[in-house]
Amino acid sequence: MKNLKEFIWPIIGLGAVIISGGLLYRELRGLSLVDVWTSLTSIPPHRYAMAIMSTLLAYGALAWYDRIALLHLGIRHVSWLFVSVTSFTTYALSHNIGASVFSGALVRYRAYTQKGLSAPQVAVLVALCSFTFGLGTVLLGGAVLVIDPTLMERVADRIPEALSSPTTARIVGVALLVFVALYVLGSLLHLRPVTIRSFTLGYPKPEVMLRQLVAAPLELIGAAGIIYFALPEANNPGFLIILGAFLASFSAALVSHAPGGLGVLELIFVAMMPDVPKADVIAALLVFRLFYLLLPFAIAIVVVLLFERARLAKAWRDRMPATIPPVPPPPP
């Protein structure tokens, strides 16, 4: 049974890639690579620069996730540089390979135990970072649906009418914001932890909670900003709609366990952009994958190799005195 659990999520992820890839092929049938390349080369340099700035904002906010978790644990001796490199490496790997295959907990465990954290502390840190991301998704998702409840009408021909109704969207949005409000109240009132089966949700201190409410939206806004700036100004539906489409597609990509959300992200995002030329949407998503996923992934691999090389060298140096006999002094 244990071996089955190790393989079930990778299999589900692979299945999601295959199915979404087939559906995406049908969606983009007739679209040529020349059209996509033309869209890519048509993006002005200043908008590429803004997409890069959005990437830095997103990864800076992700580093803040770890810093907030360390604050929750009462740990202040770990430097911002170390936290930033660890966070960047963790998310760059897990976003591409898939959290079910390569858990961010492994990278954080190997890094933070070097700074004196125990395994339970690292587990709390990982859980709080994951919850911070989820909190940001719920907060922004609720806000988008309340501000623009017509968002789901963009896919009205693909989902049941009841789900695309603005009334339904606003109700869902309000419910999401109520969840966030209850979490805020629980923190402010210092309520006891909520336990659901084996899962326990402990309310952090208000100073931690407030940082969560800022950091998580910043990360998602930065990531969505990459796509926003990569799309042409003409026919651009606006940042709010792009943010809503990104939240839906990125969340589905994570739930699918597909490596990098491959196919799933594109399928849902393209479906939610019916008024934007498909070549422009695919070009923007390629820019997103390059800046947010592929380039960070390449850098993260180098960081991991250097980190493991340094650990191996240290272990070898520590072992040397025990294995090599001391050299006797020369005779007088």
Image (tube, rainbow, N blue to C red):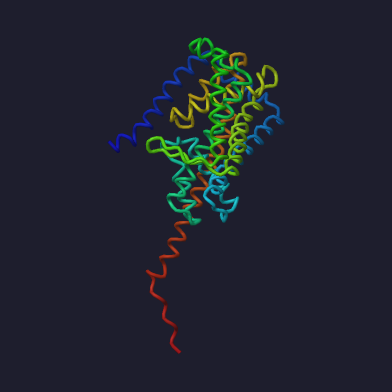
Residue 125 horizontal/vertical position (percent): 49, 45
Tell whether 90 sits left or right of 18.
right
Residue in the picture at 44% in, 29% down = 258
Residue in the picture at 54% in, 47% down = 72
Q: Looking at the image, which is closer to me, 297 or 71?
A: 71
Residue in the picture at 34% in, 37% down = 6
Residue in the picture at 29% in, 38% down = 2
Residue 295 horizontal/vertical position (percent): 56, 38
Vertical placement of residue 316 versus 291, above or below:
below
Q: Looking at the image, which is closer to me, 266 or 147?
A: 147
Residue 26 horizontal/vertical position (percent): 48, 14
Tell whether 123 sits left or right of 277.
left
Quadrant of image for the N terminus = top left
Quadrant of image for the C terminus = bottom left
Q: Residue furthest left?
A: 1
Q: Looking at the image, which is closer to me, 214 or 14?
A: 214
Tell whether 21 sits left or right of 65.
left
Number of marks in the image? Answer: 0
Residue 86 horizontal/vertical position (percent): 53, 47
Q: Which residue lies furthest to the bottom in this view?
A: 332
Q: Quadrant of residue 105?
A: top left
Q: In which quarter of the image is residue 230?
A: top right
